[in-house]
Image (spheres, rainbow, N blue to C red):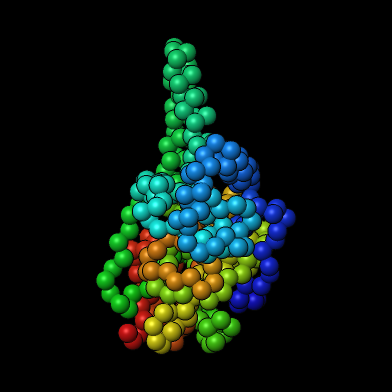
Amino acid sequence: MPQQPLIEDLPRSDALSVQPGGGVCYQVELAWGRLRRWYLRRFWPRYVERMARLREGDANGAPHEVLDPRDLKYCCTQCSARWRPEHDRFRWRDNLPFTRWGLVELQLMGWPLVAGIALLLGLGGIWKFMAIFPAGTLALVLYFFRDPRRIPPESPRAILSPADGTVVEVTRLDHYDFLGGPAVRVGIFLSLFNVHINRAPLAGRVVEMHYKPGEFLNAMRPESAERNESMWIGFEELDAPHRRFAVRQISGLIARRIVCALRPGQPVARGEKFGMIKLGSRTELILPADEVEVAVRPGDSVCAGSHILARWKSE
């Protein structure tokens, strides 16, 4: 059984697709982006000019025009364009109780459900009791895309969980190429009821990333770790001794969309959000076996960015 994900280039079947996976919601979002950029250029040229002056970095590598911060949602991994927080008039969306990576799904699924609830309530009689079904579905959708605040523990030796869910695997590997020695792999299963946002277990720098197309088996099955679609991210600590670790986002039976907003060379803070897997999945953390003490076992429930998965043996 291979111990490191197969290295394959990210497919470019859609010139505007810069994330793994796809789906109807993603295609709608890409189409909306094209329409929004046309509208801004046609009716708000001064706004476009102003944002171009304020932009830092460049848009080289982006698959489409970058007119304002909204255009960076799925191409921040492809270019260095950015705006300072005070110039980002849409930064308030980060303060919503829902992840920005799921706002399109919330609207595409949420508004029809709201309309269905209103219609059934308006019909009255026995129909109003039927409103409980779309109301329950709406509550589930809102619950799935929630984005709770997490506060990392202060311990400098602590290695945090990269995902919410249940620990289903703690396996020692004889050799892991990226780490250059033996490793321990901790697998976490994310059900439909878990928060699906991934967070960095440690402060570090992205060294390399590899996307692997694959199947969509139930993430509870051990073989899903090797056969399912996945995104592998290799990190390195910023400070000496520059220890390495890796995180792998793995799709599930229902999950068909992996979001990863990282690029090689990018620094991340401990507990920082870097992506999500939509609708049930698995996340793995791979650590150097001889340098850590694992603090969890199969069956334990963990929360990303706050629960300690392991500890370094030395600071």
Q: Is residue 176 above or below residue 38?
A: below
The outermost residue toward the left is: 154
| Figure quadrant of the N terminus | bottom right
Can residue 309 be spotted in the picture? no
- Tell me the residue at 67%/58% (across/down): 215
Residue 191 in the image, given as x and y percentages of width and height = 48, 52
56 vs 11, nearest the viewer: 56
- Tell me the residue at 65%/52% (across/down): 16
Q: Is residue 113 above or below residue 245?
A: above
**How many numbered tags mark residues here?**
0
Quarter of the image where one finds residue 302 = bottom left
- Tell me the residue at 42%/60% (across/down): 273
- Tell me the residue at 40%/52% (across/down): 87
Quarter of the image where one finds residue 21 = bottom right
| Figure quadrant of the C terminus | bottom left
66 vs 125, nearest the viewer: 66
Residue 116 in the image, given as x and y percentages of width and height = 50, 24
Can residue 195 be spotted in the picture? yes
